[in-house]
Image (cartoon, rainbow, N blue to C red):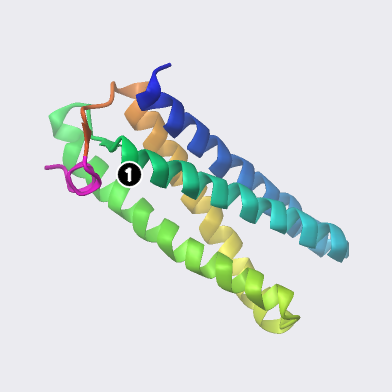
């Protein structure tokens, strides 16, 4: 494993850990374990933050990996990637809002948005893993490029 694949592996691992913790936290609140729920969701937020730090560090200092798979799948991959990025951005905003409302004891709002946030985060994690698998497992990644070139396929 080289520098171009170690960071994506680490960041993807943090996303998976975060999603698993969200699932555990959701179950905890269903069975009435409020304090355990708070701690687990905080840990999920830490894992998501670590993902973001690793991802942005790689993006800033190394660049992003461009599509290296077959040309006939390039457009489909880039549409999927853009969907993932938009969904991840929405999930992050929802996640921060849900956490703030939970810590402010605005439980009705927290509960309502929390359900949507959790499902959005699960889909984000799944699509993030899919992007990782497509770029680093199924097909050899392309060249490392500035972020906008890698996202839009230039």
Residue at horizontal 28 percent and vertical 21 percent from the top: 140
Q: Please state the horizontal and vertical placement of residue 57, each as a whole percent of the image.
A: 41, 42
**Residue that badge 1 annotates:** 60
Residue at horizontal 23 percent and vertical 35 percent from the top: 66
Residue at horizontal 54 percent and vertical 44 percent from the top: 15
Quadrant (top left, top right, bottom left, bottom right) of the N terminus: top left
Number of dots carrying numbers: 1
Give the main secondary structure, helix, strand or loop, of the magenta stretch.
helix
Decide: is 17 above or below 38: above
Residue 78: quadrant of the picture: top left
Q: Please state the horizontal and vertical placement of residue 2, each as a whole percent of the image.
A: 39, 18
Residue 131 lies left or right of residue 94; in this view the side is left
Q: Please state the horizontal and vertical placement of residue 73, each as a whole percent of the image.
A: 20, 35
Residue 131 lies left or right of residue 41; in this view the side is left
Helix, strand or loop at label 1? It is: helix
Quadrant (top left, top right, bottom left, bottom right) of the C terminus: top left
Residue at horizontal 63 percent and vertical 67 percent from the top: 115
Seen from the viewer's position, the closer of residues 144 and 35 is 144
Residue 86 lies left or right of residue 93; in this view the side is left
Decide: is 67 above or below 123: above
Decide: is 85 above or below 108: above
Q: Please state the horizontal and vertical placement of residue 144, each as a whole percent of the image.
A: 24, 31
The boundaries of the magenta stretch are 146-154
Q: Residues within 10 Å of mark 1 (few under 14, many from 20)?
A: few
Q: Is residue 118 magenta?
A: no
> Residue extending furthest top?
1
């Amino acid at each position: 494993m080289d520098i171009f694949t170690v960071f994506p592996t680490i960041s993807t691992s943090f996303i998976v850990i975060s999603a698993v913790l969200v699932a555990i936290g959701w179950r905890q609140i269903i069975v009435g374990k409020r304090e355990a729920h708070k701690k687990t969701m905080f840990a999920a937020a830490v894992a998501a933050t670590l993902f973001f730090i690793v991802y942005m560090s790689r993006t800033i200092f190394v660049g992003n990996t461009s599509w290296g798979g077959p040309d006939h799948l390039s457009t489909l991959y880039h549409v999927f990637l853009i969907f993932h990025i938009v969904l991840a951005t929405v999930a992050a905003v929802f996640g921060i809002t849900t956490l703030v409302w939970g810590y402010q004891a605005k439980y009705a709002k927290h509960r309502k948005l929390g359900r949507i946030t959790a499902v959005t985060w699960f889909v984000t994690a799944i699509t993030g893993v899919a992007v990782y698998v497509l770029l680093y497992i199924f097909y050899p990644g392309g060249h490392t490029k500035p972020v906008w070139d890698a996202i839009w396929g230039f």
